[in-house]
Image: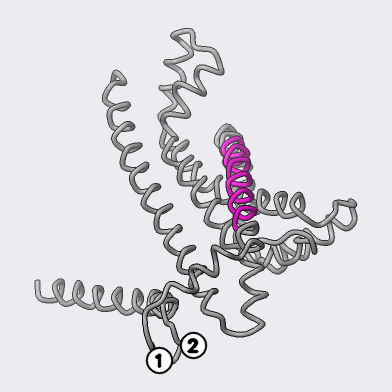
Amino acid sequence: MNNSTGSRTLSRIYLGIVMVILYAPIFYLMYYSFNSGGHMRNFEGFTLQYYKEVFQDTRLIIIVINTVVLALLSSAIATILGFSGALAIVSVRRSRTRNTLLSLNNVLIVSPDVIIGASFLVLFTMVGIKLGFMSVLLSHIAFSIPITVLMILPKLQEMPSTLVDAARDLGASGRQVLTKVILPFTRQGIFAGFFMALTYSLDDFAVTFFVTGSGYSTLSVEIYSRARQGISLSINALSTMIFLFTIILVAIYYFLSLKSNTQNRSFRTEVPK
């Protein structure tokens, strides 16, 4: 009993240290975004000046809108394609072929972003696609699809095959099976895939840096460009708002997951044994 209590205590201490290492720089950045002194050494007074500068910067507002539109569009398309890919993997009967497809999917996730970005740059140059919104969109869709597949695939594997068989025996068409059985059961995985793809698209820098053109930019590339020019607390303010927006996304995903779990439990209880 004492060993178990000690292990739990050490686990909590370790978790606390990890959380401090991860979040201390973020809170440090957020704290000095309100510093009227204009530096990150001593806090001289509270001000919202740098937040006003962010909202008064027309170029930055346009880049934020571009980034959000890009993330939503690429995440939606990647989720649709990832759902189709997960269905295709599940439908493969031979386990060896299925594992091969899944391994090929996973390779894209663990591949370095620099390699992926450079590969897309070479590809777009060869094909003749002009660097800009379309090149960034295609890149974000491509690296988001493997993530959505991994989020959706476990839910498809959990779904009993008898549900689909029962629906077909009752006369359901292929479309009805998809919309009335498969989609409701995998809703949580679909939400998870969409929000993961959304956060990856919002945060991505390495791939976007390679494929963005001179007339188009995303928030991560813009922050990097401004940070190279020197410390500006407007970057702190912008980063603080992005962090809070991410927290809101996580909260939305959490509540949607709770709702989806409740619906899945009721869905299972309604299925006859």
- Dot 1 amino acid type: Asn
Which residue appears farthest toward the top when viewing the image? 171
Residue 39 is marked as 2
Q: Is residue 216 above or below residue 41?
A: above
Residue 98 x, y percent position in the rendering: 60, 42
Question: Which quadrant is the N terminus positioned in?
Answer: bottom left
Q: Quadrant of residue 166?
A: top left
Label 1 neighbour load within 10 Å: few <14, some 14-19, many 20+: few
Which residue appears farthest toward the left when viewing the image? 1
Residue at position x 60%, y 51% in the image: 71
Is 263 contained in the magenta span?
A: no
Question: Which quadrant is the C terminus positioned in?
Answer: top left
Q: Would you say 189 lies left or right of 128 here? A: left
Identify residue for label 1: 42
Residue at position x 55%, y 18% in the image: 175
- Looking at this view, is 12 or 131 the one in front? 131
Q: Main secondary structure of the magenta part?
A: helix
Label 2 neighbour load within 10 Å: few <14, some 14-19, many 20+: some
Is 75 contained in the magenta span?
A: yes
Q: Is residue 66 above or below residue 59?
A: above
Residue 79 x, y percent position in the rendering: 57, 41
Asked whether the beta carbons under mark 1 and mark 2 sit within 8 Å of each other, the answer is yes
Residue 211 x, y percent position in the rendering: 76, 61
- Could you tell me which secondary element the residue under label 2 belongs to? loop
Residue 157 x, y percent position in the rendering: 46, 37
Q: Which residues are magenta?
A: 64-85
- Could you tell me which secondary element the residue under label 1 belongs to? loop
Q: Would you say 101 lies left or right of 41 here? A: right
Q: Is residue 161 above or below residue 231?
A: above
- Dot 2 amino acid type: His
Q: What's the image's color scheme?
A: one colour
Residue at position x 45%, y 87% in the image: 37
